[in-house]
Structure formats: structure tokens, C-alpha cells
Amino acid sequence: MIQDIYNQTISTERLTLVVPSITKKDYQENLTNVDCHIQPLDPKINQDIEGGFGKDKLLFCDVLDIIEGDRIIHGSDTYRIVGIEKFNNDILGRSHHMEIIIRIFKS
């Protein structure tokens, strides 16, 4: 099963409204101690916007409350979720899991 390769732990943060009267948003802790596996997705650095460079990795974990835009904290690195694919009804009998594209941004 895919869970057998989960050898890392992350936490997640979600952008939430912290001061409703001025619609101020900030990242708040969402999930902690999430078992996962992270591996490189692409060896090159990509550019999304002018001056915005990032390196993509692929994160595997159980199906959880994780959405695009959430932050992933792994050690001293902070990633942003840029893509999610959920495998809930796998007809081949494999376990349910998520494959998440995460990006660490560099300037």
C-alpha cells in the first residue's frame, strides 16, 4: 500500500479571515503531524509570473482536508499547494490517497 512509503511529516496552514471588520486574512494552522512522502516532480525551476520562480515537488498523503492555496510546512521549508488529485474510488484495489503538487518559491 502507498502508506508504506510515508516517511515524512508535515503540517498545513490555511488562509483564513482573522479580523472580520477589515477583512484581514492570515494563515492559520490547519493540520499537524500529517504522514506523507515528498519527492521531486521536476528537476528544473519554473516561472509562473514575472520574477516568481518555484520548484515543484509531489506529495503523497491520505485523503485529508487539504485544498489548493494551503501552505505545507516541512521542516524549515514552506511550500504552496498548486494542484491536487484525489484517488477515492480506485478500482484496482489500491488505497485511497492524494497526490499534491507543492511549490517552494525562490527569488
Image (tube, rainbow, N blue to C red):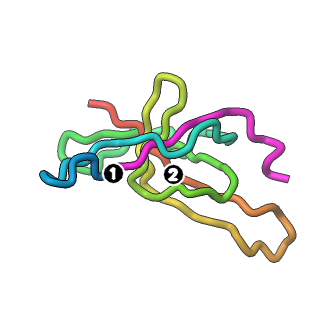
Residue farthest to the front, as pictured: 21
The residue where tag 1 is placed is: 16
Taking the spot 33% from the left edge, 51% from the top edge, the residue there is: 16
- Which quadrant, please, contains the C terminus? top left
| Residue 6 on image: x %, y % | 74, 40
49 left or right of 72?
A: left
Name the residue type under label 1: Thr
Q: Give me the disc on residue 68.
A: none
Q: Nearer the viewer, residue 58 or 43?
A: 58
Please, what secondary structure does the residue beneath circle 1 have?
strand
Residue 25 sits above or below residue 65 on the image: above
Q: Quadrant of residue 85?
A: bottom right
Alpha-carbon neighbours of circle 1 within 10 Å: few (<14), some, or many (≥20)? Answer: some
Q: Nearer the viewer, residue 98 or 101?
A: 98
Which region of the structure is painted magenta?
1-15
How far is mark 2 from mark 1, CA to CA?
21 Å
Name the residue type under label 2: Ile
Please, what secondary structure does the residue beneath circle 2 have?
strand
Taking the spot 42% from the left edge, 54% from the top edge, the residue there is: 82
Q: Are marks 2 and 1 in contact (CB under 8 Å)?
A: no
The residue where tag 2 is placed is: 101
Taking the spot 53% from the left edge, 24% from the top edge, the residue there is: 75
